[in-house]
Structures are given as C-alpha cells and as structure tokens.
Image: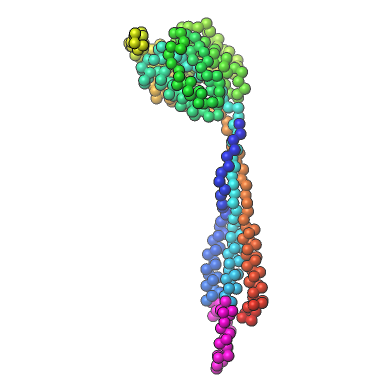
Amino acid sequence: MMKINILPESFEFLHPHFLWLLLVLPVLVFWYLWVGNTDKSRLTIGNTRGLLQANTLLSRSRYILPLLRIAAVGFLIIALARPRTYSVSRKTKTNKGIDIVMAIDVSASMLAKDLRPNRLEALKKVATHFVNKRPNDRIGIVAYAGESFTKTPITSDKDIVVRNIKELHWGEIDGGTAIGMGLGSAINRIKDSKAKSKVIILLTDGVNNSGFVDPMTAAEIAKDLKIKVYTIGIGTNGNALTPVAKNQDGSFHYSLQRVEIDENLLKNIANETGGKYFRATSNTKLKKIYDEINKMEKTKIEEFTYYNYDEQFRFWALLAGILLLIELLLRFTIYKSFI
C-alpha cells in the first residue's frame, strides 16, 4: 500500500552564512555619503556667483550612483546565499502487513468479576484499543465457548472489527470451553492469508473441556502453516466471583469459585508455534499484555522523501546586474560632467 503526503511549500537559504556580508552595506553607505565627499579636489576662487547655477537637482541627485552600486552588491550577496523555495512529498509504503485473528473465550466464566466490571468487558475494551493501534493490518474475530464461530472474517475495516468486538456477549454459544475448536477456527480463517506474518491471539479463562479438536493438534497445524499463536490466560490467582446460576429475572447468582486455567496447555501452544504465553490477573496487566504483543508484531513501513527545489538566486543576480548596468550608463551619460 502506497500513501503520498505533500507538505506545504517552504523557503530557505542554502548558504545563509553569506548573509553576514549584508552588514558591510551600512559601512559602504557611510563611506560614499560622508568620507567620499571629503576626498575631493578643492578649487579656491574669489567669486562663486558663476557657479551657483551648478547646484541643480541633477547635481544633487548624483548620489544615486553609489546607492545603485550598493544595492547591486546587496542583491549579489543575497544571490550568493542561494535563496530557494522547496516542496516536500513523502511516500509511505507498507508491506503486506500482518493478519491477526483474535480467538476470544465467551463462556459464562468470562463474566467473573475479578476484572472490572468483568473479564469479558475488560477484554472488549483492551481489544478495541489494540485494534485501533493496528491501522495497517487486517484483523478477524473468532468467538468460542463449547463450540466456535467466526464473528468477523479477516478485514482491514477497523470499524467493523471494533463494532463486532463490542457486540461480543455470553450466551451466543453453548456452554463449555473448547480451546481446540477456538484455535482451529482461527487457523481456518488465517491459513490462506498472503500476509507476510500470520498471528493468532488466543484468550481463555478456563481449561479445555469441550469440543472434538485437540488443542495441541491444532497447535501443530498452526506451526506447519507458520502461524504464530500468542496465548493469554485471563483471571486472578485464587478465587473470583463467578456466575453459578441464572436467576428468573435474567441476572446471575455469583459465588466465590477457584480460578482454573490450564496454563501448561497455553504455554505449550505458544511454545509450539513460536509465540508467547501471558497471564492477565488485572485490567492493567491485560492492557500491558496487548501493548507488548503490539510492540512485538510490527508492520514494516518504508518512507521515501522527495524534495523539489525552485532556485531563486538567478533573479537576484540578474537584478544586481541590471542595477550595475544602469549605474554605468548614468555615470557615463547624464552624470558624466559631475564625476
């Protein structure tokens, strides 16, 4: 994917140190108008009435000659400093990026309140943040409990992904935790991807107790397809307020239950596929885990910068030449008799 960004036109001097020479101009003005006037030959005469007519407007305007020369010198100094305008265009090229499938456990235990307000809602918030930080990648969503289904096919449309993450809820699938089926569905979604890197983020808060796909068999398939799997066990260490029954009004009855996560299985899946296992025991820890995955899986971006210059020194050099030519013409024509 190629993106072109053109910045506003700017101005610069290529050799700005030459501009220090402009400090000489006031000295030249002083020299011509003061010192130059005193360095003249003097004629002493008895009567000046015959010379009064010589003090005309033309004679007084002869000072325009040194001023023209000084101005020409100033313009030459500016030309030496190489003024120019330039525009910058940047082309950003990304490779085929990374395709990511997030396999998310939506079993009843994800409503446990050891994370705020519960595990599933905490995950949805963090996952949304993760998606928004991956503008160059395609992302898909697989939901699983006792079985699995594709919530979002792999897409670059982040609005669709975020909306479907927010719509995840318990009760869409039969109860249980089929880690193997969740991983298998994610593999099916990403296996035909042409992306340079293929990643699955598998999150669960339990043990594999449902489904007909063995998790390690799915992990071996992922390895053969060069799919990296990051696994996340979500849930505090110890006991957590977990829903154990549903009341008639649709609310849940909670009681303290011991958190059971098959960490060995999750570690083995990650190790088999070249990924990494994480344990999220709080909202903050969960966010840090997704931030760490975000840093590890980077899309390569190449930026090419092009500069287009429009040199302005020729104008100033030409202007200086014109002033010198005018000064010479005036010196040897109109003001010839005053020099």
How far across and how far down the image is residue 187, in percent? 56, 15
Residue at 44%, 8% (x, y): give it: 175
Residue at the outermost front position:
249
Q: Is residue 134 above or below residue 203?
A: below
For image coordinates 54% across by 61% down, the residue present is 20
In this view, the residue farthest toward the bottom is 46
Q: For residue 47, which quarter of the picture?
A: bottom right
- Which quadrant of the rendered structure holds the N terminus? top right
Task: Tell me the residue at 58%/68% (across/down).
Answer: 70
Vertical relation: 146 (above or below) 166: above
* Image-based side of 262 in relation to 91, left or right: left
Q: Is residue 178 magenta?
A: no
Colour style of the rendered protein structure: rainbow
Q: Nearer the viewer, residue 85 or 15?
A: 85
Instruction: Give x and y (percent) for residue 287.
Output: 43, 25
Q: Residue 67: x and y, percent?
A: 57, 71
Q: Which residues are magenta?
A: 35-61
Q: Residue at left 63%, top 59%?
A: 315
Count of residue discs:
0
Left or right side of 163 for 258: left
